[in-house]
Image: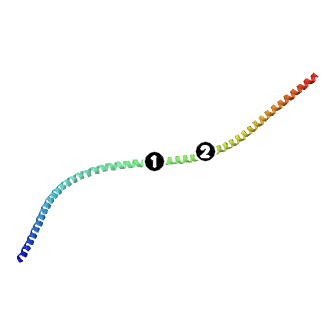
C-alpha cells in the first residue's frame, strides 16, 4: 500500500512536471513569437522613423510654400477687404436712396388709394343718383306716354265726336238748304 501510494505520488509529480514543462514550452514559444513581433515592430518603427523624417522634410517645405502663399493671400485679402468696404459704402448709399424712393412711392400709393376710394365712392353715388333719376325719368316717361295715349285717344274721340257733329251739322245744313 505504501508502494502504491508512493507510485501515485510519483505519478502526480510526473504529471505536474510534464504540466510545468508544457507550460514552460508554451511560454518559450510565446517568447519567441513576441521576439519576432518585437523585431517586426522595431523594423516598422525604423521604417516609420525614416518616413517621419521624410514627411518632416516634406512638411517643412510645404510650410515654407504655405507661408509664401499666405503672404500673397494676405495681400490679396487686404485688397479684397478694401474693395468690399467700397462696395458696402455704395450698397448703403444705394439702399438709403431706394428706401427713400420706396417711402415716397408708398406715400404716393396711399394718396392714390385715397383718391381711388374717393372716386369709387363718387362713382357709386353718381350711379345711385343715376339709377334714381333713371327710375324717376322712366316713371315720368311712362306717365307721359300714358297721358299721351290718353290725350291721343281723347283727341281721336274729340275728332270723332267733332266729325260726327260736323257731319250732323252738314246734314242739318243740307236739310235746311233743301227745305
- Residue placed farthest to the right in the image? 179
Tag 1's secondary structure? helix
| Measured Cα–Cα span from mark 1 to mark 2 | 36 Å
| Residue 141: % across, % down | 74, 37
Residue 134, quarter of picture: top right
Q: Disc 1 vs disc 2: Cβ atoms closer than 8 Å?
A: no
Relative to 48, 147 lies left or right? right
Residue at which label 2 appears: 116
Q: Residue at x 68, y 42 (%)?
A: 131
Q: Is residue 114 above or below residue 26?
A: above
In the rendered image, residue 42, in percent from the top left (x then y), is placed at: 16, 58
- Locate residue 77, reporting x and y percent: 35, 49
Judged from this view, the residue extending furthest toward the front is: 1
Q: Secondary structure at mark 2?
A: helix
Q: Nearer the viewer, residue 122 or 127?
A: 127
Residue 14 or residue 120, whichever sits in front: 14
Q: Residue at x 19, y 55 (%)?
A: 48
Amino acid at each position: 500500500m505504501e508502494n502504491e501510494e508512493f507510485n501515485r505520488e510519483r505519478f502526480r509529480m510526473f504529471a505536474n512536471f510534464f504540466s510545468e514543462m508544457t507550460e514552460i514550452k508554451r511560454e518559450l514559444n510565446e517568447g519567441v513569437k513576441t521576439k519576432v513581433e518585437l523585431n517586426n515592430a522595431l523594423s516598422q518603427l525604423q521604417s516609420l522613423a525614416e518616413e517621419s523624417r521624410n514627411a518632416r522634410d516634406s512638411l517643412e517645405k510645404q510650410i515654407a510654400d504655405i507661408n509664401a502663399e499666405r503672404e500673397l493671400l494676405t495681400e490679396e485679402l487686404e485688397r479684397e477687404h478694401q474693395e468690399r468696404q467700397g462696395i458696402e459704402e455704395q450698397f448703403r448709399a444705394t439702399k438709403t436712396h431706394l428706401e427713400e424712393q420706396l417711402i415716397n412711392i408708398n406715400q404716393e400709393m396711399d394718396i392714390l388709394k385715397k383718391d381711388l376710394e374717393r372716386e369709387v365712392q363718387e362713382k357709386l353715388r353718381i350711379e345711385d343718383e343715376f339709377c334714381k333719376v333713371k327710375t324717376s325719368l322712366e316713371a315720368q316717361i311712362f306717365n307721359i306716354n300714358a297721358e299721351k295715349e290718353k290725350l291721343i285717344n281723347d283727341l281721336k274721340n274729340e275728332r270723332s265726336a267733332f266729325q260726327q257733329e260736323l257731319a250732323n251739322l252738314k246734314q242739318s245744313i243740307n236739310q235746311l238748304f233743301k227745305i
